[in-house]
Image (cartoon, rainbow, N blue to C red):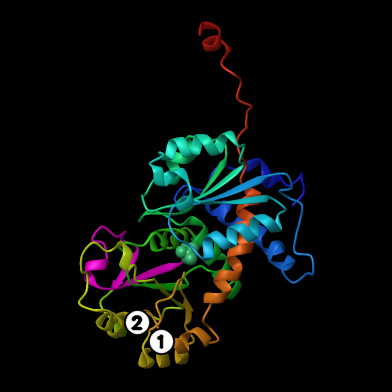
Amino acid sequence: MTKQDPEKKKRRKDLLDIDSISVEEIDFLVKTAQPFKELFTRSVKKVPTLRGKSVLNLFYEPSTRTRTSFEIAAKRLSADVTNFSVSQSSVVKGESILDTIDTLQSMKVDYMIVRHSESGVPNFIAQNTHASVINAGDGYHAHPTQAILDTYTLKEVFPDLTRKKILIVGDILHSRVARSVSTCCRKLGIEIGVLGPGTLIPDSRPDYMECFKDYATAFAWNPDVIYLLRLQRERQQAYFFPSMREYHNLFGITSNRFETVKSEGIYIMHPGPVNRGVELIDEVMTYERCLINQQVENGIATRMAILYWLQPGENKIRKPNTEIRGKS
Ligand code: CP
């Protein structure tokens, strides 16, 4: 990771989704995250890579993992980090996104990490700022950094991902995680199955997704990994299934299904936060092949790699408009 690193020439300004990045770029991020992860075992966990740069966390929606891990990642790269508190800002007085961005850009921020409930907001912001914009989750659209950290986690378990099988379970319809993770898996040659209530599996899903009607047929497909999605009650406009209990009985990792998971050696992943008793029973959290905490740990190293990789645009000093002043 020196200035001579040839990969640096290929850096982008923004990371907005997985569709627009190549397999080579995904491989580069995974490879770059490795030495960053090794730092975590040292007494000094910092490197000077982003010394003098400023990173702004701009979260219009709640977050535990993504916001915190970006903050830690940026600090471990020696950047200065500001957490913009939307609820304490002029956003609550009706300030528009464009005016907020214009204001923050005037403060010469280098990186903006953006989460918003509306799909497309990070793309809009990226078009209106010189700062590098990282999509930290927008509406139903994309959560690219989750997909990169999941890829890194999968690679730790399976160095060769080709033809491995991942079963994504739950609310595929409302899940930006499912969209980004499945796109990333597809690019890397991983086979993808989906399982969930018929109302939460989109009819427009791509052909490469194998759709299962129940766990019996899904287990017969021999998945290597079960990726459980969080049931997003806050995004559901209508009732998509009768009750949480029924969801758990049909699509959760119950005691019986956990026996199959263990006997088949299937790995468990989940982006968090977990709804215990809905997506899984408590015992799954301490299963030796449960990767949920490893995903969180890898979130820091992969986000360090992403910050390292992106190249903010030129941040020009705004000149006073003398022409208008002269007329007044
Ligand atoms: N996985 C994820 O996005 O979690 P947070 O909502 O806590 O950031």
The residue at which mark 2 appears reads as: 252
Left or right: residue 67 compared with residue 264:
right
**The image quarter in which residue 195 lies:** bottom left
Element at badge 1?
Answer: loop
Q: Amino acid at mark 1?
A: Ile
Q: What number is the disc on residue 33?
A: none
Q: Is mark 2 within 8 Å of ligand 1?
A: no
Q: In the rendering, at what x and y percent does residue 157 appear?
A: 58, 75
Marks 1 and 2 sit apart, C-alpha to C-alpha, by 8 Å
Residue sitting nearer the eye, 208 or 301: 301
Instruction: Please tell me whether residue 198 belongs to the stretch shown in magenta.
Output: yes
User: Residue 191: x and y, percent?
Assistant: 42, 68
Furthest toward the right, the residue is 43
The local crowd at label 1, few if under 14, some if 14 to 19, many if 20 or more residues have their Cα within 10 Å, is some
Q: Amino acid at mark 2?
A: Gly
Kindly check if marks 1 and 2 are in contact, taking CB atoms under 8 A apart as contact.
yes
Residues in magenta?
Answer: 189-211
Residue position marked by numbered label 1 in the rendering: 281
Is residue 204 one of those drawn in magenta? Answer: yes
**Closer to the N terminus: mark 1 or mark 2?**
2
Left/right of residue 71 with respect to residue 86 in the rendered view: right
Residue 94 as seen in the image, left or right of residue 164: left
Total marks placed: 2
Residue drawn where x is 51% and y is 6% of the image: 327
Q: Is residue 314 above or below residue 175?
A: above
